[in-house]
Image (cartoon, coloured by chain):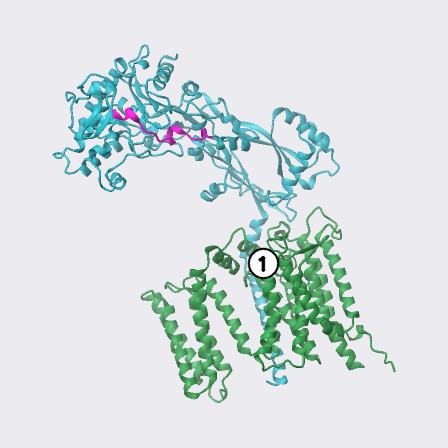
Amino acid sequence: MTDYELSKRSYVLGGVAVTIIAIFVIRLFYLQVISDEYKKYADSNAFLKRSEFPARGVIKDRNNKLMVYNQMTYDLMVVMNDINPSMDTISFCRSLGITKDDFIARMDYIKDRGRNPSYSRFTQQMFYQQLNEKEYCLLEEKMFRYPGFYIQKRAIRQYSTPYAAHVLGEVAQVSAADIEEDNYYQSGDYIGKMGVERSYEKQLRGQKGVHVLLRDARGKIRGAYKGGAMDTPPRAGRDITLGIDAELQERAEQLMKGRRGSIIAIEPSTGEVLCMVSAPSYDPRILTTRKRGEYMKQLQKDKTRPLLNRAIMGQYPPGSTFKPSQALTFMQERILNTSTSYPCAGGFRYKRLKIGCHAHPSPLNLYNAIATSCNGYFCWGLYYMLNNRSRYSSLHEAMSTWRDYMVSMGFGYKLGIDMPGEKRGLIPNAEFYDQAYAGRWNALTILSIAIGQGEVMNTPLQIANQAATIANRGYYIIPHVVKQVEGERLDTTYSERHYTMVDRRYYEHVVRGMRDAVTSGTCRGVKIPGYSVCGKTGTAQNRGGDHSVFMGFAPMHNPRIALVVYVENGGFGADSAVPIAARIFNKYLNHL
Amino acid sequence: MIHSRPSIFHTIDWWIAGIFIAMLIFGWFSICGASYTYGETDIFSLSSRSGMQLLWIGTALLLGLIIMLLDNHLFDALGYILYGAMLVILFLTIFNPKQIHGSRSWLVLGPVQVQPAEFAKFTTALAIAKFMNSYDFNYNRLRHWAMAFAIVLTPMFLIICQKETGSALVYLAFFLMFYREGMSGAILFSSIAFILYFVIGLKYQDTLIWHSTTSAGTFFVLSLIIILSVIFDYVHSENLSESPLFRQPPLRMLAASLAITLLAILFSAFVIPFNVSIVMTILLILIIIYYCFRGLKEDNKKYLLIAAFALGSAGFFASVNYVMNDVMAPYQRARINVLLGVEEDINGIGYNVHQSEIAIGSGGVLGKGFLNGTQTKLKYVPEQDTDFIFCTIGEEEGFLGCIVVLGLFLALILRLIYVSEQQATRFGRVYGYCVVGIFTFHLLINVGMVLGLTPVIGIPLPFFSYGGSSLWGFTILLFIFLRLDAERKRAIQL
């Protein structure tokens, strides 16, 4: 190509430049002249929607004793733009009780957009959280000397006792995940994190209001938009009454001091939880202080896991407390009746399987088997059930039937208590064993589930629910900690009766056996004056030391309280759990 | 005998110098608007961005003056030395332990931070001008072209290694100069086409068209390949003017293809939804076969070239899809997608573009007035005094202000093209077109990004964005050309 021809290419390049500019002008014309959309967006940027927070509902116990309430606290806020550079920082620090280094570090933190992304020179920033009454008084009268600093009132949660931490839960700032899940929340809002505070968050928090404000280019507020016509008022949170008896809770927690495990008491007729203890616990009041983060870290690191609510999250072998459910199933399925006797000389012996038992008369019937907690008896029962080929066509079918009974009694699935984090425990079915034993299993392989060992796992709540079911002679109401929400009817989920697959008449036999256990059997220690207690002990085998369990209810007729005490590594049932149970019954029934 | 040579200030191109000054003034006011925070009333204070920029502007003017006073031959003589020195600096910068904003491209020299990549543009331009000006440079030797490409691509590669992909892409601007100097238009044409395939194909990959299962990205790219192939044919056809427009074979083929495609779309929309791109792929294959057949029959290389272009386009697009979906790790894919604006990263790049469109859109015809922009003042737009400076202009000065700025840039670029064509030496012309290419590229990418048209690539708007390195870099780049041009006119007037 000649130079002349090439020089014509300059027109092509000029054309490219003109084209680019033309496209830009068209786009700008669309953005700035034609479209309204972007002006609207800009307006929404220029509005400031300030939330108005209603008072959070308080939490009371069943006797209307206040358990959680709101307390005013004072935060020291700062607007960087308004600070007087020559202010007397020394005296300021002295009234706050901090050093000058603390002051500088805090200021640096506030100004660092990396750590404090919402920083602006014109808006209030948190300088110091939760001044106590003394600090507040000291500072308040000197505030005029420190322009740029403001004291802001804020409500925090306060607890009237150091007890029931797991049930009540706590309130803390929302996490990014909370905001993602529910767009009601904005960064900096507070939300219930555990316990009732979490599960009844919507009722407790109420509905925050919105105050629409106009903001100018300086970030300064120019008053309400349209005279407040766009504002919505906040709606107060609802108060909550728990089924928990604060005094019983306190007694139960004191009894569990130094131990690991849990106590749950349920009112059988309503399903209301009277007390729920998970030990070790913590004082909920320490988490409302300025040093919350520090304490939280300590609790999270603690090897005894005080933050875990063992009552609904702990999954344990139920041990002998499982036997009543077996007796009921065998009777309903006509495997045995009250006059059936099985031999037990030191345990179950058949072919090469041996399951040990303690010394007691042999052979024995159902009442004695429950009263003395005989292992052999229930092993024979399950053996005959699983191998009954006239009733069930296969081992599979027998196993499935057994499992259905257990599930109907509330085992193997979450009961649905109104608390977050409940676990389901484990009730094995035929498919479970097919997998575990590659299809090669028979009744003998799995027989220990009859005595609450082997693969069976229950939460303490499920055991307590079993006690309530027996007390009710055949039905349960899903256990719940909240008795009433102010101005609302309680969810019918918590008033429906759930009947098990076993008839009422069979329950009477088990009740008699459990009564015998208290009068002449394994839990004589739970006798209390004035009331006929029914009970069943359990010793759940565990490698690190057996767990001590008690399950029972009182009085025998028209029961008022169903109880489970589960003490980790507590030895025999009668050793640790039974004496604790006796004192709980006494406290609740006799006010002793 | 000593001629009194005319002063350098008589022969300087005052058009360009005037536009330069106008841009500096307009730019400084924009930075005042963008960085102004209430409470800091002193816009001249060195602690504010506007005050600092004033310092940079002053030193930049001084730099320009010094360059005008330098000896003309210095630039030719120093071309390779400066280029070599800059390569060493760029190479060393890769191992810079100090990272600023996630890249290693900033060198800290005492109180100042310098970005060597900004200065590498003029050294590269000088070197390539010197190389192409040399006597043994032969336009018909492939080897010489390869060397010219290497001169441009080496600094580009080093800058990519500093994780400054945006600054590196600027070096593609040199290809505009190569085109002017005789590089086949087909290469420029194909590379622009390939970039379009890449951007459009990925950007609209997951959008479906009209009740069918067709990916809009694939649809657009296949349409582009067909249209571009036919245009290729049309542009290079001889004796076309004899027959009426609709009789010409390439256009008839294009019309037929588009009609079939339209039928397929309608069928898919109203009868049975299916993937229209299958039909288009078949059409494309037929077109390729047609050109191969014609090329072999008439023994005409042009048709084979078109067939190769179409086939290469399709192959490129297929391999981009394959690499993106099957070879790359998810995070790499995400990064490219965010870069192209496919994935709306609410807190990241997508947010920036959205906020920048809001700021500009809210400016209206006349703007909100100097220092009155709410969007920029309340810091909704990030990087608003550097890469997103055009936002502030749009919000505060409105449509008219934007037109003025774009008009200044257009005038500068057209004037630079004009003056480059006037150059007596190839050295001056090549250098001039390098300047044209670099300014054009910066304008295209920066303003395009702010307007939401091009991918988000962080490069400054010349003479407007805050920052000493970029202002100095552009000033040196421009003033070397002014110096070369002034010398030419002085020689004429002599």
Location of residue B365 with respect to A210 vertically, above or below: below
- The crowd level at tag 1 (other Cα within 10 Å; few <14, some 14-19, many 20+) is some
Query: Which amino acid type corresponds to the residue marked 1 in the rendered image?
Result: Lys
Q: Is residue A158 visible?
A: yes
How far from the left and from the top, in percent, is residue A263?
38, 23
Q: Quadrant of the N terminus of chain B?
A: bottom right
The question of residue B301 being in magenta is answered with: no
**Residue displayed at 45% across by 84% down:** B248
**Residue displayed at 78% across by 72% down:** B71
How far from the left and from the top, in percent, is residue B198?
49, 66
Q: Is residue A239 visible?
A: no
Seen from the viewer's position, the closer of residues B461 and A323 is A323
Where disc 1 sits, the SS reads loop
The question of residue A315 being in magenta is answered with: yes
Q: Which chain is green?
A: B
In the displayed structure image, the side of residue A108 where residue B309 appears, left or right: left
How far from the left and from the top, in percent, is residue A159?
50, 25
In the displayed structure image, the side of residue B456 where residue B73 appears, left or right: right
Seen from the viewer's position, the closer of residues A320 and A271 is A320
Location of residue B263 with respect to A51 vertically, above or below: below
Chain letter of the residue carrying label 1: B
Question: Quadrant of residue B353 in the image?
Answer: bottom right
Location of residue A10 with respect to B119 vertically, above or below: below
Disc 1 target residue? B163
Seen from the viewer's position, the closer of residues A555 and A519 is A519
In the image, the segment drawn in magenta is: A303-324
Seen from the viewer's position, the closer of residues A135 and B396 is A135
Q: Which chain is cyan?
A: A
How far from the left and from the top, in percent, is residue A202?
44, 35
